[in-house]
């Protein structure tokens, strides 16, 4: 029987995994600059954590979640996105307490799961990097999160970006807009897709998120939520746009953006990249927004929140299409060439001493001749080769060669073991 990975998953092999490490470490360093700290939550949660927060009419809940009953007859689901689990943890661990500095800023990274048709950059097991900030209603925090997302993508070498923003307003806004949307769509009920017909009276905003061609003509001509903003919602959104202007961050207001999850309100945004690797035209690679009622929805106090999520697989496709140069991974400082049986043990001692002193080092483990060992050192782009044989062991010496300029020196063996860094600094 031939075993294969499950459909919609991928093996991340050496050579590729280093790119993932670079993406993750770049994110960690940038988030630290913005004072965000890491949070890690389980890969599976109680089903209600996502069904309650994502919305019963969302595609995630109705079509895409990997949910099942475990041996204790508990209804659980593999996490389809990061925010709800972070909010659950925030509430359960009382991170909203009076002694906690507000806003509480966290980031996460890891695998998510959705049962959808696998395609380039969209797998059933995919990876997200995201941030969440709790405890402030300030539009300034919305803008910080947007600016950080743009900053992160630019750190990855992605510059042809388009920022689209919208607002879903407050409860008063959504109540008024919901009625207007139902009044607009109801006469076209028979022409809507089956999904949109089902969503019309439950959550008409979901119709605006439809990708079905049958719905597009109605979506394009739907009333704009911007015409139904309450005074409070308009004030918040105006401040967001003013601040983006002040920071020199270009954006486009797109009233059709609603996001695929029901918990958003006020500011929402999508950052799109222009690359054929993701499809024709601009395609969303990072998105997020404000969700002021979500903490309360999961049993916590009234506590505002805002954040974003970024898909790593799509980011990698984009970086490779844009020919972004990744840094050199795992450079080899020294390769020890052992000649003869006596050198076998000594070369092991040498590589271990070098490693203990902070250098990356390797040697032959296949009992190959010196010529083959030197060829391997070249292939591995070793900075230095260290050669030792029977005579060198007897003399207590070792030959060190700089592979870039071919300069070679002979040193005392013990000096190399103890002070390799100092020797190469002074002699090469």
Image (spheres, helix red, strand yellow):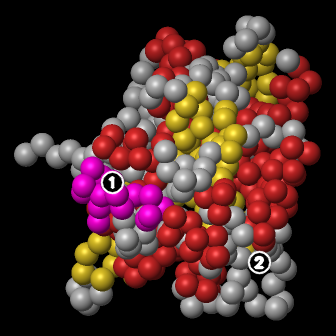
Outermost residue toward the left? 1
Q: Quadrant of the C terminus?
A: top right
Outermost residue toward the top? 406
- Residue 273 appears anywhere in the view: yes
Residue at image position (70%, 40%) is 252
Residue at image position (55%, 49%) is 256
Instruction: Place residue 177 in its image quadrant.
Output: bottom right
Residue at image position (44%, 64%) is 183
Q: x, y (%) of residue 399? A: 71, 19
Question: Who is closer to the viewer here, 339 or 92?
Answer: 92
Number of the front mark, 1 or 2: 1
Q: Which residues are magenta?
A: 181-198
- Residue 105 appears anywhere in the view: no
Q: Can residue 119 be found in the magenta stretch?
A: no
In the image, residue 136 above or below residue 412: below
Question: Who is closer to the viewer here, 364 or 252?
Answer: 252
As helix, strand or loop, the secondary structure at mark 2 comes to loop
Q: Give the residue at mark 1.
A: 188
Q: x, y (%) of residue 416? A: 77, 33
Res 135 label: 2
C-beta proximity under 8 Å, tags 1 and 2: no
Question: Who is closer to the viewer here, 407 or 55?
Answer: 55
Tell me if mark 1 has few (under 14), some (14-19) or many (20+) residues whose alpha carbon lies within 10 angstroms of its own. few
Q: x, y (%) of residue 80? A: 42, 63
As helix, strand or loop, the secondary structure at mark 1 comes to helix
Mark 1–mark 2 distance (CA, rounded to whole Å): 42 Å
In the image, residue 253 above or below residue 415: below
Give the mark, 1 or 2, whose residue is nearer the N terminus. 2
Horizontal relation, residue 311 to residue 61: left or right: right
Instruction: Place residue 154 in its image quadrant.
Output: top right
């Amino acid at each position: 029987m031939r075993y294969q990975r499950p459909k919609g998953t991928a093996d991340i092999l050496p050579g590729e995994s280093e790119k993932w490490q670079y993406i993750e470490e770049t994110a960690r360093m940038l988030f630290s600059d913005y004072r965000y700290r890491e949070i890690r939550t389980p890969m599976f949660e109680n089903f209600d954590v996502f069904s309650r927060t994502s919305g019963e009419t969302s595609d995630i809940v109705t079509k895409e979640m990997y949910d099942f009953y475990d041996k204790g007859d508990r209804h659980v689901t593999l996490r389809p996105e990061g925010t709800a689990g972070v909010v659950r943890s925030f509430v359960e661990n009382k991170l909203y307490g009076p002694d906690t500095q507000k806003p509480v800023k966290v980031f996460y990274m890891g695998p998510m799961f959705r049962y959808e048709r696998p395609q380039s950059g969209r797998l059933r097991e995919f990876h997200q990097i995201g941030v969440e900030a709790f405890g402030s209603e300030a539009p300034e925090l919305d803008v910080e999160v947007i600016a950080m997302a743009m900053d992160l993508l630019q750190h990855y070498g992605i510059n042809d970006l388009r920022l689209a923003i919208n607002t879903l307003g407050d409860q008063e806004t959504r109540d008024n807009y919901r009625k207007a949307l139902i009044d607009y769509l109801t006469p076209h009920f028979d022409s809507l897709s089956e999904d949109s017909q089902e969503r019309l009276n439950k959550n008409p905003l979901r119709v605006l998120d439809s990708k079905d061609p049958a719905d597009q003509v109605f979506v394009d001509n739907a009333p704009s939520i911007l015409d139904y903003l309450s005074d409070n919602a308009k004030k918040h959104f105006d401040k967001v746009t003013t601040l983006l202007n002040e920071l020199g961050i270009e954006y486009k207001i797109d009233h059709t953006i609603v996001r695929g999850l029901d918990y958003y309100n006020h500011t929402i945004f999508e950052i799109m990249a222009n690359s054929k690797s993701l499809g024709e035209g601009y395609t969303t690679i990072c998105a997020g927004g404000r969700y002021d009622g979500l903490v309360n929805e999961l049993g916590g106090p009234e506590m505002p929140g805002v954040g974003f999520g970024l898909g790593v697989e799509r980011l990698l496709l984009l970086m490779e299409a844009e020919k972004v140069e990744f840094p050199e991974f795992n450079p080899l400082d020294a390769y020890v060439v052992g000649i003869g049986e006596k050198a076998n043990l000594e070369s092991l001692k040498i590589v271990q001493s070098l490693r203990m002193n902070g250098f990356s080092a390797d040697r032959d483990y296949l009992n190959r001749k010196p010529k083959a060992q030197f060829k391997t050192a070249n292939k591995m782009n070793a900075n230095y080769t260290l050669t030792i044989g029977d005579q060198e062991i007897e003399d207590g010496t070792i030959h060190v060669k700089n592979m870039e300029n071919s300069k070679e020196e002979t040193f005392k063996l013990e000096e190399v073991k103890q002070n390799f860094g100092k020797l190469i600094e002074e002699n090469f």
